[in-house]
Every structure is written in C-alpha cells, then in structure tokens.
C-alpha cells in the first residue's frame, strides 16, 4: 500500500539555523508527494508538491524538498529557520482517489 | 477569495445526538474530502467524493455519513455520535486528477462528544 512515514515527531532548531524535516514514502510506482504546514488553530496550507517533474521542488516561505527515488525520500528543508516557521508539518501522498498523510512533525524554533 | 468554509468551528454535543458539519467550497472543485486529525495519528481520510452523487469510503468511515447533492457542498453527518468521535475535523477540496493538484483545506471543526 502506498504511504508516507515522517521520521521525527518533534524537531527543535534555533532561529537562523537550517531546518530538516524527513519524510519517506513507500510506493511501487512514482508517486506524487506534498508537504503541508499547519499553524495553530488553522487549516493545512500547501508548502510544495512533487508531481514527477523536477526532483528539486521549491515552495513558499523559502522551503524546498528533493525527491530521491533511490532513498524513497522527500525531505523538507529550509536554510534558515524563522520564528514564524513554528508549526506542524505533514507530508502526504495520493493513490488513486485517496490521500495518505504522515503523522506529522512539530517544529519548534528557539529564539 | 478562494476558500473552503466549515461550520460550526466548535461543537460540544452528547452521545447519540445527531449532528451535521457543513462544508462548502467556491472553487468549482470536483473532489471533496473529510478528514479527522488526532494527536499522533496525523490526518485520516473519512470519506471522499469525486463529483456530485459520487462518494466513497476512506480509511475510517465507521460512524459517519456524507452526501454530495451539489458540487460546492459536502456535509459530514454523525447520526449517533460517540465519545471516540471527539476529534478535529477538516474538509478539503481539489481539482482532479488528485495526483496533480493540491488540496485546499477548511479551518477545521473541533468536535467534543460527551
């Protein structure tokens, strides 16, 4: 079955340092993959998506992710964390008409 | 403004009292879906709809009903709510094919069943 695994439930970084949020996928074929961000008491907002085009995907707010088929990964990165990046992050993949979300990674940014 | 709206945002009810959470989108999306979010479990899909009068079960459909009589609306019905349905619920919509398009999410409905 197609699914995603977020490897860290919590990540803490200092403001201005790099962010790495990890997502692995399992799929027998080339998937579509999405990263969403959820700020407190808000709905989910798309950060970026991979749909079989360029393997390095740039998103909003300075985030990017690289699709690595050999590692079955789609990790989310940002060179320099900002306080406003503190939120919950979800990776997600569709299969046919259903969506499969990871369990989420809570990002804390320390001033 | 393109948006998905849900009502109510907060709801406290008692076991067995039927309730409906409404969802509406103004983007002419074919695809609509309901999720529940629970700590440590992420988002799990309850039901989805590919178009008017076309609905199907997600991973956790037990205890829920949906209908899609109009393209813009996709209400979630709990005919006999139980405490294990206490959760945060999200409605979402998208163009098709879903492999190519992101979902747009509503602000969420926090449901407590006592």
Image (tube, coloured by chain):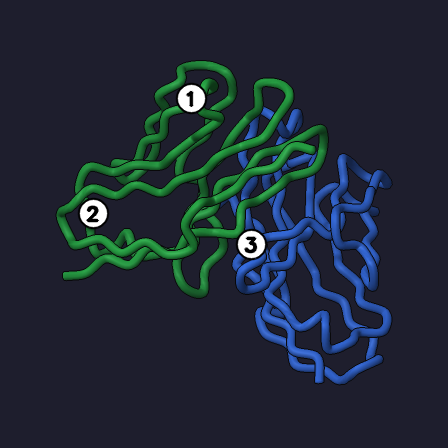
Chain colours: A green, B blue
Q: Is residue B95 above or below residue A111?
A: above
Label 1's element?
A: strand
Q: Which mark is residue A9?
A: none
The quarter holding residue A94 reads top right
Identify the residue at horizontal 70%, vertical 79% (top origin): B113
Q: Residue furthest top?
A: A53
Q: Rate crowding at label 1 as few (under 14), some (14 to 19) or many (20 or more) other CA atoms within 10 Å.
A: few
What distance separates the C-alpha of mark 2 from that of mark 1?
23 Å
Q: Nearer the viewer, mark 3 or mark 1?
A: 1
Chain letter, disc 1 residue:
A
Q: Position of residue A56 (x, y in %)?
A: 35, 21
Residue located beneath label 3 in the image: B42
Residue located beneath label 1 in the image: A68
Q: Position of residue B70 (x, y in %)?
A: 78, 45
Label 3's element?
A: strand
The quarter holding residue A87 reads bottom left
Chain letter, disc 3 residue:
B
The quarter holding residue B48 reads top right
Q: Nearer the viewer, mark 2 or mark 1?
A: 1
Ranked by sequence position, the earlier of labels 2 and 1 is 1
Q: Is residue A77 above or below residue A9?
A: above
How many discs mark residues in the rendered view? 3
Instruction: Let me know if marks 2 and 3 both belong to one chain.
Output: no
Label 2's element?
A: loop
Asked whether the beta carbons under mark 2 and mark 3 sit within 8 Å of each other, the answer is no
B1, B62: nearer the viewer: B62
**Residue A80 appears left or right of B75:** left
Q: Position of residue B1 (x, y in %)?
A: 48, 45
Q: Which mark is residue A81?
A: 2
Identify the residue at horizontal 49%, vertical 26% (top origin): A72
Q: Position of residue B86 (x, y in %)?
A: 67, 73
In the picture, the quarter occupied by the C terminus of chain B is bottom right
């Amino acid at each position: 079955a197609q699914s995603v695994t977020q490897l860290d439930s919590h990540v803490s970084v200092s403001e201005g340092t790099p962010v790495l949020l990890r997502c692995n996928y399992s799929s027998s074929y080339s998937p579509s993959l999405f990263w969403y961000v959820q700020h407190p008491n808000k709905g989910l907002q798309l950060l970026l998506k991979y749909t079989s085009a360029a393997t390095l995907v740039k998103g909003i707010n300075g985030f990017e992710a690289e699709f690595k088929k050999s590692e079955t990964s789609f990790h989310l990165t940002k060179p320099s964390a900002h306080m406003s990046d503190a939120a919950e992050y979800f990776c997600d993949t569709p299969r046919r008409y259903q969506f499969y979300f990871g369990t989420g990674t809570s990002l804390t940014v320390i001033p | 403004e393109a948006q998905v709206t849900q009502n109510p945002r907060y709801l406290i009810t008692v076991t067995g009292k039927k309730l409906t959470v409404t969802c509406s989108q103004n983007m002419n999306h074919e695809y609509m879906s309901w999720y529940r979010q629970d700590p440590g479990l992420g988002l799990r899909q309850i039901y989805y709809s590919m178009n008017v009068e076309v609905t199907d079960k997600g991973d956790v459909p037990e205890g829920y009903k949906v209908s899609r009589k109009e393209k813009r609306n996709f209400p979630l019905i709990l005919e006999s709510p139980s405490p294990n349905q206490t959760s945060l619920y999200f409605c979402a919509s998208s163009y098709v094919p879903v492999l190519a398009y992101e979902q747009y999410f509503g602000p969420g409905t926090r449901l407590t069943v006592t």
